[in-house]
Image (cartoon, rainbow, N blue to C red):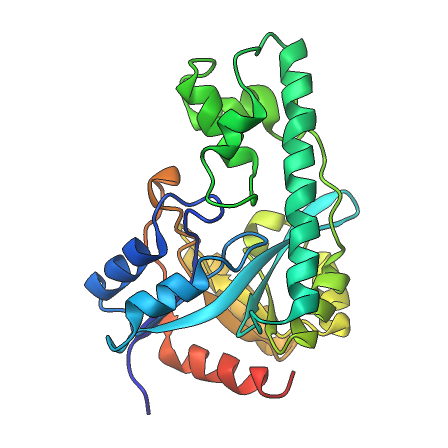
């Protein structure tokens, strides 16, 4: 039986992380991980560079993605593992989703200007990205850099968090649509960080739509919380996955390898991907 551990939730500078794919691979190898998944938001651009950097090292880099979804005005994220990066339909969907991200930031900047934030442009925010997978974390970083807030957390609580003056909702696909898309391109659909979503009553509907896994292991989750979601995984015959949700320097509360699962989880995902 294969041995080792895996971190199945990592971001690079192609979305809202700060590490390059090459840096991610170096950190993963330093942590003695057997496998990782690059799961950037709405982009696959970080996967090929990471796989190239890991070639010959024994580290498996799983093609993954984190898709933004919305249901009942609640943000839900779906992770997809072993997706087909070359699928044209998937790439077209991702281009549209990144366009929506840019337009959302444009709207937020208009609203921020009404709040007295006048020294930030769209180009300023986009300069923090390697592609157009721009998000609120980039905007929060620029608010801090320009001196409007003392911290990224303050940017969210004062300006751009849900319910705050400059918050703008983003039109997204539904979780059911994301599950269908992930499975259609050969991937395994997993619900990301359900302990943050706090909408467990929606999970049975996701299962009916084809959900295959749930992220039970997550940074700073208590043993009780992990046990609860492992129980849901068993109840609904889902794979219990996990990962650090590392964003490099953009998220100080976690790092690559901080949360990991056994390599048998990877083997299970791989098996499911063959039958999606």
State the residue in front, 46 or 180. 46
Q: Quadrant of the N terminus?
A: bottom left
In percent of the image, x 63 and y 71: which residue is there? 87
Percent x, y of residue 85: 56, 69
> Where residue 243 sits in the image (x, y, percent)?
42, 61
Total label count? Answer: 0
- Residue at the top extreme, as displayed: 116
Is 268 or 12 nearer to us in this picture? 12
Q: Quadrant of the C terminus?
A: bottom right
Closer to the camera, 230 or 248? 248
Residue 248 lies left or right of residue 171; in this view the side is left
- Outermost residue toward the bottom? 1
Picture coordinates of residue 268, whole percent (x, y): 49, 83
- Looking at the image, the residue that sits furthest to the left is 30
- In this picture, is 68 found above or below 91? above
Question: To which quarter of the image does residue 104 belong?
Answer: top right
Q: Residue at x 29, y 62 (%)?
A: 25
- Is residue 3 visible in the rendered image? The answer is yes
Q: Residue at x 63, y 21 (%)?
A: 109
Up/down of 114 relative to 174, above or below: above
Residue appearing at x 47%, y 40% in the figure: 129
Can residue 165 be seen in the rendering of this structure? no
Q: Position of residue 229 (x, y in %)?
A: 55, 65
**Relative side of 208 to 270, left or right:** right
């Amino acid at each position: 039986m294969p041995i080792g551990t895996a971190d199945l939730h990592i971001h690079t500078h192609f979305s809202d992380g700060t590490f390059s794919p090459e840096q991610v691979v170096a950190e993963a190898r330093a942590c003695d991980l057997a496998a990782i998944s690059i799961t950037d938001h709405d982009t696959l651009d970080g996967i090929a560079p990471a796989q190239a950097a890991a070639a010959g090292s024994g580290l498996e880099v799983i093609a993954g993605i984190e898709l933004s979804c919305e249901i009942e005005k609640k943000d839900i994220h779906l992770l997809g593992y072993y997706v087909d990066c070359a699928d044209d339909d998937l790439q077209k969907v991702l281009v549209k989703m990144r366009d929506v991200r840019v337009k959302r930031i444009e709207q937020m900047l208009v609203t921020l200007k009404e709040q007295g934030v006048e020294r930030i442009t769209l180009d300023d925010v986009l300069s923090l990205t390697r592609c157009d997978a721009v998000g609120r974390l980039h905007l929060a970083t620029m608010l801090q850099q320009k001196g409007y807030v003392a911290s990224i957390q303050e940017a969210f609580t004062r300006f751009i968090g849900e319910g705050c003056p400059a918050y703008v909702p983003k039109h997204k696909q539904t979780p059911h649509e994301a599950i269908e898309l992930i499975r259609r391109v050969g991937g395994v659909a997993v619900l990301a960080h359900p302990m943050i979503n706090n909408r467990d009553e929606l999970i049975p509907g996701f299962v009916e739509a084809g959900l295959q896994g749930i992220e039970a292991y997550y940074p700073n989750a208590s043993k009780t919380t992990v046990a609860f979601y492992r129980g849901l995984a068993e109840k609904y015959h889902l794979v219990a996955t996990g990962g650090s949700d590392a964003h490099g320097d953009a998220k100080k509360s976690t790092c690559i390898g901080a949360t990991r699962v056994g390599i048998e989880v990877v083997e299970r995902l791989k098996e499911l991907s063959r039958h999606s």
